[in-house]
Amino acid sequence: MTQEKIDRINELYRKSKAEGLTEAEMSEQALLRKEFVASVKANLRSQLNNIDMVNEDGSVENLGEKYGKQTRTS
């Protein structure tokens, strides 16, 4: 997600509070929000898949390899 898209989301939000949005702007806003949420989920999933846990016996276990690495897009 680029900074320009984030700025556009914020611009549409401010406009919706001030004067309202047209149908085209509402659908653009919904599409941008959906893309933003998908980006946040993908980033979080990537971070969680790279967590290493040190077990009591000193071995290191990658939790992403054990539980994660899902490519689901929901």
Image (tube, helix red, strand yellow):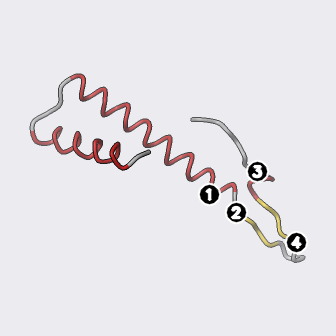
Q: Amino acid at mark 1?
A: Gln
Q: Secondary structure at mark 4?
A: loop
Check residue 67 in the rendering and tell me which mark sits there, or answer none. Answer: 3
**Residue flagged by tag 4: what amino acid is it?**
Ser
State the residue at coordinates (26%, 46%): 10
* SS at mark 1 in the image: helix
On residue 51, which mark appears? 2
In the picture as drawn, the residue positioned furthest to the left comes out as 19
Mark 1 or 4, nearer chain start: 1
Task: State if disc 1 and disc 2 touch (CB < 8 Å).
Answer: yes
Q: Which mark is residue 59?
A: 4
* Residue under label 1: 47
- Nearer to us: label 3 or label 2: 2
The disc placed on residue 64 is none
Quadrant (top left, top right, bottom left, bottom right) of the C terminus = top right
| In this rendering, position of residue 2 left or right of residue 45 | left
Mark 4: give few (<14), some (14-19) or many (20+) Cα within 10 Å: few
